Image (tube, rainbow, N blue to C red):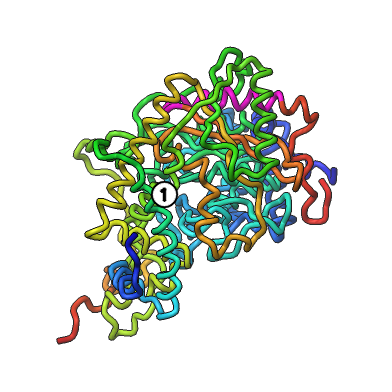
Amino acid sequence: MTGHSADLTRRSAAELAALVASGDVSAVEIVGAHLDRITEVDGDVHAFLHVDTDGALASARAVDVARASGQDLGVLAGVPLALKDVMTMAGVPTTCGSRILEGWRPAYDSTVTRRLKDAGVVVLGKTNMDEFAMGSSTEHSAYGPTHNPWDLERIPGGSGGGSAAAVAAHEAPMAIGTDTGGSIRQPAAVTGTVGVKPTYGGVSRYGLVALASSLDQAGPCARSVLDAALLHSVIAGHDPLDSTSIDAPVPDVVAAAGRQDISGMRIGVVRELTGEGYQAGVQQRFDEAVTTLVGLGADVVDVSCPHFPYALAAYYLILPSEASSNLAKFDGMRFGLRVGDDGNASVEQVMSMTRATGFGDEVVRRIMLGTYALSAGYYDAFYGQAQKVRTLIARDFEAAFGVCDVLVSPTAPTTAFRLGEKLDDPLAMYLNDIATIPANLAGTPAMSIPIGLAPEDGLPVGLQIMAPAMADDRLYNVGAALEAALLAQWGAPLLDGAPALGGAAA
Amino acid sequence: MPSITRDEVAHLAQLARLDLADDALDHHAAQLQVIVNSVATVAEVAAEDVPPMNHPVPLVNVFRDDVVGPSLSVAASLGSAPAVEDERFRVPRILDEE
């Protein structure tokens, strides 16, 4: 330990909230410790695109004042959080990892940001991401990649690599991610952290800069299942500002995280999401985790979801189609970058120059793919057929949940690969999301939790738990049970084995 | 398998308002072909009688009471604009010269 400060960055969100509530430690002290940690290690990790030091300290002071005056504090009041840079926050830059939005300071809060503020959660800053959330490595950020805290030469996953790395590097005890095809869960898997994609419609998309509107869902990133549940409970719930927001009570995820008992629960191992294509050490840790689940009294069965092998193809037609439409608003007229406005060029020429300059390679690629898939002559064969496959994938889930309470698989087929390794091979990059995409297509909730290190490279492996729509609580029930059993086997949290960062060992 | 010509990519870029250089068009033509060949596997699924799914939850119109609520001020709306004139967004000319 280097002192009190370092100690605070190792605490869970639940512990930090308790320290603030009891008055043992002030919110200002907790936030200051995390800001110090960011100063110390973020030069190496690059999880943050913007650190809102003054705003964070002001929010922390407000929590301390509220406590001193005897006001009721929220369950996470005074706890610092890292916000993915795809979520608006009034007055603070939102770039989505793109040059086209460089310098944009939105005039409004997203609903998620609003709920965090209302709960007294302190936003430290905005985290790095693949441009407009298109990618699985954060290498498509216009501002340079984030580095995996386990090995700085490797990817932290994507698109939410900044949020996952911030949590793994103890720069923040929790973070917000967004998951369109795995962008919360895959970064969680490769950084040894917990990430949850809630049921589609469970968390408001108001103020979330859209990638694919029928797939996008924001959710919690944390170092434990309980912390993720606490954050989930703060951000979830009906929002009249999002027409797809579900008007129903939020499943009691916090209670579920406190329930360790999974005896008699029916858990299905998805046949199509194991075996060929999965790294040996990933498969080994997954098989061991399944054995642990059996040991906890679960009834584990083999389940087939025959259309899952087509999910990746359907996704890479549906997502670009929706994205090419959503990204049409970046035209250089009302906000963001404008290029070539010399007084002679027409609005069309200025738009075309602005977009070609402001968008990176992967964004251009997907806009072109979406434009192609939606164009006359190809619509039925591509977009139309992909929507039918989407129906079949949702039906596979329905059938599987007819015989199982939850499904499990490895979260990602491999551990973290080296920066640059797959950058020029889009198809190889897309394969990282092969196990996470089905839940986005069906709109069902899913979680990734760490289950150990792959023997061949010593890097984290994640297990994915999938549940039916609005049964998010089951993820937390199974996740907490497995987490407790693994912690008992390991004797210490997995992240304690990560290398020290920034020269100063904690 | 449809093959994607360079002219077709140039047309797509024009539709998508992307002013791409020649080498970028070549680069994207080659990569798009590889990706399209891969995603075309959706055609292998027999789905003749299957209804399309465009959304995970049923989409319905959402209404609110017709009352005035807070909205952004002119200054806030124009605050991030690349060019402003007379309290409006200033845009390049919208008509071609002829």
Left or right position of A441 against A497: left
Q: Give above or below for A367 relative to A237.
A: below
Q: Is residue A477 magenta?
A: yes
Q: Secondary structure at mark 1?
A: helix
Q: Is residue A500 magenta?
A: no
What residue type is disc 1 on?
A: Ala
Q: Can you give x and y, in whole percent of width and height, for residue B1 in the image?
A: 34, 59
Q: Give above or below for A457 relative to B6.
A: above
Res A207 seen here: no
Mark 1 packing: few (<14 Cα in 10 Å), some, or many (20+)? many
Quadrant including the C terminus of chain A: top right
At a point 40% along the width and 31% down the height, the residue shown is: A396
Q: Can you give x and y, in whole percent of width and height, for residue A186 in the image?
A: 57, 44
Left or right position of A463 against A342: right
Near-viewer residue (A371 or A166): A371
Q: Quadrant of residue A265?
A: top right
At a point 47% along the width and 45% down the height, the residue shown is: A181
Res B93 seen here: yes
At a point 23% along the width and 59% down the height, the residue shown is: A377
The rendered magenta stretch, by its main secondary structure, is classed as helix
Q: Give above or below for B46 relative to A486.
A: below
At a point 63% along the width and 61% down the height, the residue shown is: A421
Quadrant including the N terminus of chain A: top right
In the displayed orientation, state which residue is furthest to the left.
B98
Near-viewer residue (A389 or A477): A389
Q: Badge 1 is on which residue? A: A313
Q: Can you give x and y, in whole percent of width and height, for residue B37 in the image?
A: 40, 58
Q: Chain of mark 1?
A: A
Give the extent of the magenta segment: A468-485
